Image (cartoon, helix red, strand yellow):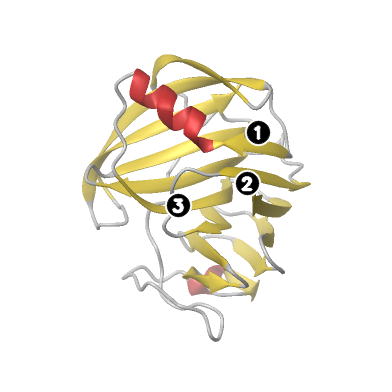
Amino acid sequence: MVSFTALVAAAAAGATVVASPLQAVQAVQAGIQPGTGKHDGFFYSFWTDGKGSIDYTNGPGGNYKSKWNNVNNWVGGKGWNPGPPKKISYNGTWDNYKVNSYLSLYGWTTNPLVEYYIVEAYGTYNPSSGTSKKGTVESDGGTYDIYQTTRVNQPSILGTSTFAQFWSVRTQKRVGGNITTQNHFDAWKKYGLKLGTWDYMILATEGYQSSGSSDITINEIK
């Protein structure tokens, strides 16, 4: 599966946007345009490679809604920037077990540049397929398998780069619950997977060569 690492220009009126050379706005049917920004106290990111149609809409607080049709690859969600370790809760609907999609806490660090995923649920494709398993971690009532892989000369938040990907993939899929990110970060460190300086972190929906929908709300547990 293609990871979502590129950002595109343009966002909803009044939003703060990080520009990108990619142009994929023709794929958007409603809601906001692809890009990144701030909305109602949260950071959001919405990216598409421009194929198929996506309706991505930011709701109140940590809520977002998405509906996609015949896409190649898209991803979006809400969270924080920067995204240091947090305990978060999330709930909503993501009924995409029969299509190629997944729901994950997703983020980046720099120095070193790392793309990471805490995968809560996935459909017909396990996004960690083909990666190297390092171990497991018990967290928030479940077991997650830990993986690592390397992306070579691929798009990233710093442009085309070579960088590591770290994964925690929940063995019993769920949609809703708590995620204690520090547990995963500590486990990754235990297995030699080093993170850097925090960049953004979002609770993301991703679709790949599929059609589907989601309605997700994320909050921080203080």
Label 3 packing within 10 angstroms: few (<14), some (14-19), many (20+): some
Which residue does the numbered mark 2 point to in the structure image? 210
For disc 2, the neighbor class at 10 Å (few under 14, some 14 to 19, many from 20) is: some
Decide which of tag 1 and tag 2 comes sooner along the chain. Answer: 1
Whether pointer 3 and pointer 1 mark residues with C-beta atoms closer than 8 Å, the reply is no
* Residue 137 drawn at (x, y percent): 52, 18
Q: 9 and 167: which one is in front?
A: 167
Quadrant in which residue 187 is drawn:
top left
Q: Position of residue 163 (x, y in %)?
A: 26, 40
- The residue at the point 77 percent across, 42 percent down is 95
Residue labelled with disc 3 = 83
Q: How far apart are marks 2 and 3 (CA)?
A: 29 Å
As measured in the structure, the alpha-carbon distance from the residue carrying label 3 to the one carrying label 1 is 26 Å
Residue at disc 1, secondary structure:
loop
Q: Name the residue under label 1.
A: 123
The structure residue drawn at horizontal position 28% and vertical position 42%, both measured from the top left corner, is: 196
Q: In the image, 159: left or right of 48?
A: left
Q: In which quarter of the image is residue 144?
A: top right
* Kind of residue at badge 1: Gly
Select label 1 or label 2 by which is in front: 1
Disc 1: CA contacts within 10 A as few (<14), some (14-19) or many (>=20): some
The kind of residue on which mark 3 rests is Gly
Which comes before the other along the chain, label 2 or label 3? 3
Which residue occupies 71% across, 54% down? Answer: 217
| Comparing labels 2 and 3, the label whose residue is closer to the camera | 3
Camera-nearest residue between 217 and 222: 222
